[in-house]
Image (cartoon, grey):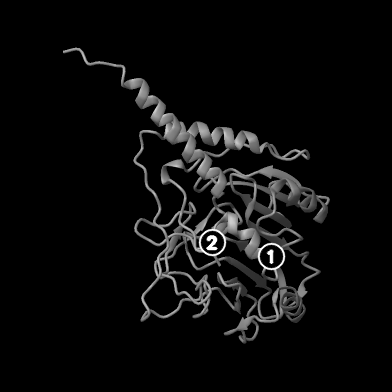
């Protein structure tokens, strides 16, 4: 897997474009246009270029995110898709994700996979449930762009809610689905587990800590080399997406909670959790969440924004050279 340097400026984090949720799709041109406008407004802010990933010495143990046989230093990616100051950068970016996804048994939720364009995904989402009402999400965290589809009585907890977040290029980096089952139609735990393992376990999956009886939570994650890990949660000792010690979980919508930071060794994470009826093996609701830190920002768009910002900065400086002080 190709190690890449981070190519973003923290000052170029863009404002949300209020996209339309009509059947014709979303205006990504408007998103990029608004992003360029915001980058111009950010000209007075200090530039913060993310650090590039570095390799460790031969004495450092190889991390789960090793690229080929080369060990890499673990870094921390923030909610905005950028490394924390001084941390090694992303090992996988949105340009590399397509190639990466082609090398693994790519998971999907309701036919929607990470990296898919939101315009292509929306017709598929609508087919999942004819009762869906499509809404543009009220952005709560980090200027994320997203839409959600809800079914069920208005002004009540949705019986079925499907949420996607997408980056500046319209490519999906997070998928979430929550389903509330009718009270007289619960799901048997064994049926739920069998279906999950058949759908998400790849042949080479490394499975650990997944033997808790009557425990309905499961997780899968992928390292940069395409190795899949499975457990009851992402914090399996060898998993590349395990939480860091100071990780907090942030609600980014009324139904989606994600970590406030990610390991740079995490290529893709998937969790499924369920709520069971008291003292039974019957499931009443369940939630699926899938994301990739590599897709939070689109490299090409951010490079374009950076180039435009620098161009206009140079032009402003050249124009200012003609001005002379009056003493």
Please identify the quadrant where the N terminus is shown.
Answer: bottom right
Q: CB of mark 2 within 8 Å of CB of mark 1? A: no
Asked whether residue 306 is in view, the answer is: yes
Residue 248 as seen in the image, left or right of residue 178: left
Q: Position of residue 102 (x, y in %)?
A: 69, 65
Expressed as whole percent of the image width and height from the top left, the position of residue 114 reads 66, 58
Q: Residue at x 36, y 24 (%)?
A: 318
Height in image: 141 above or below 202? above
Look at 79% across and 48% down and name the residue there: 123
Residue, x 69% and y 51% (percent of image)? 156
- Examine the rendered structure and indicate whether residue 82 appears above or below residue 209: above
146 vs 185, nearest the viewer: 146
Q: Quadrant location of residue 245?
A: bottom left
- The single residue placed furthest to the top in the displayed view is 326
Residue in the foreground of this view, choosing between 231 and 117: 117
Dot placed on the residue nearer the N-terminal end, 2 or 1:
2
**Along the line of sight, which residue is nearer the eye, 42 or 195?**
42
Q: CA distance from mark 2 to mark 1?
A: 14 Å
Alpha-carbon neighbours of circle 2 within 10 Å: few (<14), some, or many (≥20)? many
Is residue 80 found left or right of 156 in the rendered image? left
Q: How many marks?
A: 2
Q: Which mark is residue 243?
A: none
Label ID, residue 92: 2
The residue identified by callout 1 is 102
Report x, y in % for residue 69. 50, 77
Q: Residue at x 65, y 69 (%)?
A: 272
Q: Secondary structure at mark 2?
A: loop
| Quarter of the image that includes the C terminus | top left
């Amino acid at each position: 897997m190709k190690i890449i340097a981070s190519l973003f400026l923290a000052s170029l984090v863009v404002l949300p474009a209020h996209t339309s949720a009509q059947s014709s799709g979303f205006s990504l041109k408007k998103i990029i246009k608004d992003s360029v406008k915001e980058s111009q407004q950010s000209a007075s802010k200090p530039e913060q270029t993310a650090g590039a990933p570095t390799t460790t010495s031969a004495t450092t143990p190889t991390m789960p995110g090793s690229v080929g046989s080369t060990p890499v230093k673990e870094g921390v990616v923030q909610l905005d898709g950028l490394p924390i100051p001084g941390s090694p950068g992303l090992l996988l970016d949105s340009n590399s994700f397509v190639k990466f996804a082609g090398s693994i048994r790519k998971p999907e939720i309701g036919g929607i996979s990470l990296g898919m364009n939101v315009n292509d995904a929306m017709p598929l989402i609508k087919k999942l449930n004819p009762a869906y009402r499509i809404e543009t999400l009220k952005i709560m965290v980090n200027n994320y762009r997203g839409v959600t589809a809800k079914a069920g009585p208005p002004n009540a907890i949705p019986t079925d809610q499907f949420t996607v977040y997408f980056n500046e290029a319209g490519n999906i980096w997070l998928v979430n689905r929550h389903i509330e089952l009718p009270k007289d139609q619960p799901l048997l735990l064994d049926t739920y587990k069998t279906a999950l393992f058949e759908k998400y376990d790849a042949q080479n999956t490394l499975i650990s800590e997944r033997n808790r009886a009557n425990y309905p939570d499961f997780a899968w994650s992928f390292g940069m080399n395409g190795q899949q890990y499975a457990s009851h949660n992402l914090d399996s000792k060898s998993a590349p997406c395990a939480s860091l010690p100071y990780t907090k979980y942030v609600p980014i919508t009324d139904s989606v909670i994600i970590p406030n930071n990610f390991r740079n060794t995490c290529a893709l994470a998937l969790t499924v959790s369920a709520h069971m009826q008291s003292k039974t093996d019957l499931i009443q609701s369940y939630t699926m969440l899938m994301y990739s830190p590599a897709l939070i920002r689109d490299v090409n768009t951010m490079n374009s924004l950076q180039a435009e910002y620098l161009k206009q900065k140079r032009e402003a400086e050249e124009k200012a050279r003609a001005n002379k002080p009056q003493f």
